[in-house]
Each structure stands twice: as C-alpha cells, then as structure tokens.
Image (tube, rainbow, N blue to C red):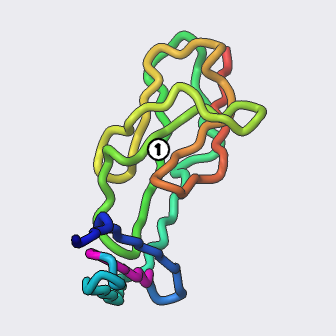
Amino acid sequence: VVSTQSTKAVVSTQSTGSGINAEYESSGINAEYGGTFDTAEIKISGEENDVTITAVENPVTCTINKKPCAMSFNIESLAGKINRNDARICKLNDDGSLEDCTIPKGTGPYKRGFGKTKASQAGQYVCTYGDYQSDPVTLELVQ
C-alpha cells in the first residue's frame, strides 16, 4: 500500500535593494514512502521604479459657472512608459480619502477638465499613479 500526500508549493518573497528574491519549494509523494522532495530557488530581479508627479500649476484658479477649467500634472517614470489608464486625478477629502476620481486626458501633461464649474468642486486635488501620489493642488473658484 502506497500512501501519497497531495502536492504542495510554498512561495516566499523577499524585497531587497536590488530587486525581489523568490523561493519556491515543492513536495510531491511523501518521502517516508519512497517519494521525492525537491526545492528550487528562483531569483527575480529588475529595475526599481521611481515615479514623480508634479502639478503644472498650483493653485489653479477658475471662474465659477464658466468654462474652461482644467488641472494638469506631469508624470515621469524612471522605468517604463506611463500608462494613462493607470493614472487618476481625484478630489482629496479632509480625512485623506479620495473621491470623484477620473482618468486624465492627454499623454503629458495629463489633464482633467472640470467643464462648467460648480462651487462644490473647489478644494484640494491629487494625481495618483499606482502607489504614488502628488502633492495636493488647490482648485480655487472665483466669481
């Protein structure tokens, strides 16, 4: 009678200054019944990325109930091309949460248009890209 143990895999990762190391361990048939036990170390490395997001203008001043009104950000990456669909321009609430997020237009600078502005749109806005976030930009509305 041969007893088997289900195959299992364990993957552990460790971030280092030069990339990510991953260790993979796999076991099959239980070794005490004549099975095997294998391990392998896999090293994954790549360039670390640093993203810089800067406002084109701060503060942005627009006239209430008038067009046009827009806010623009430059997004620069050390590794790879910027994907506009991964960026968002959002209103920053007092508690630090984000609301009213939109995908910006353009390919740089990345722009959010507000159309005919309402008083409720005034406030702080940020641009996010992945885990990166710009400094707040103030949208001021005047009569």
- Which residues fall within the magenta stretch? 20-29
Image quarter of residue 19:
bottom left
**Looking at the picture, which amino acid does disc 1 mark?**
Ser
Graded by Cα atoms within 10 Å as few (under 14), some (14 to 19) or many (20 or more), the crowding at tag 1 reads: many
Question: Compared to 76, does 44 lie above or below?
Answer: below
Q: Answer with left or right where residue 57 lies relative to residue 48.
A: right
Disc 1 on helix, strand or loop?
Answer: strand
Provide the residue designation for mark 1: 72
Residue 31 is situated, as x and y percent measured from the top left of the image, at 33, 84
Residue at image point 36% right, 84% down = 32
Inspect the magenta stretch and tell me whether residue 22 lies in it. yes
The single residue placed furthest to the front in the displayed view is: 1
Residue at image point 23% right, 72% down = 2
Task: In this rendered view, identify the residue nearer to me: 6 or 63.
Answer: 6
Residue at image point 31% right, 86% down = 37
The quarter in which the N terminus is drawn is: bottom left
- SS majority, magenta: strand
Residue at image point 28% right, 69% down = 3
